[in-house]
Amino acid sequence: GKTAAAEYRGAGLDDWFMPEKSHLMIAQIYIKDRFEKACHWSTTPYGSSHAWSVDFEYGSVSLYGRRLEFRVRPFRRLSI
């Protein structure tokens, strides 16, 4: 996840990263329509075998075992 996002070169840019739970929660509030209606993994861990995910269909934020397959979506760094 993290390595793939850091190596991602979408649109020729190199400032991509895997979002934390808080980043996905903000995206769920403000730009939900830009995400597929599915759960997306965050980089926010819970212990050694679980992580937080955000569901862009129902709006839930949940813990799941890392063995499950959910979507991942790299984010770009915002410079103001």
Image: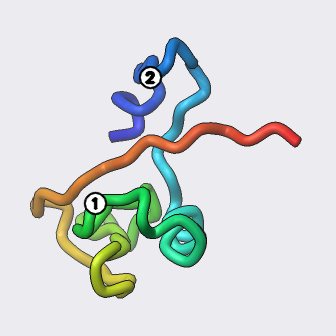
Residue with the mark numbered 2: 10
Indicate which disc, 2 or 1, sits on the residue closer to the N terminus. Answer: 2
Q: Quadrant of residue 34?
A: bottom left
The C terminus, quarter of image: top right
Q: Is residue 76 left or right of residue 60?
A: right
Name of the residue lying farthest toward the front: 33
- Name which residue lies at 25% across and 69% down: 37
- Name which residue lies at 59% across and 71% down: 30
Q: Amino acid at mark 2?
A: Gly
Label placed on residue 45: none
Q: Is residue 7 left or right of residue 65?
A: right
Q: Quadrant of residue 71?
A: bottom left
Name of the residue lying farthest toward the left: 68
Residue with the mark numbered 1: 36
Instruction: For mark 1, give the secondary structure.
Output: loop
Q: Position of residue 20 (x, y in %)?
A: 52, 59
Instruction: For mark 2, give the secondary structure.
Output: helix
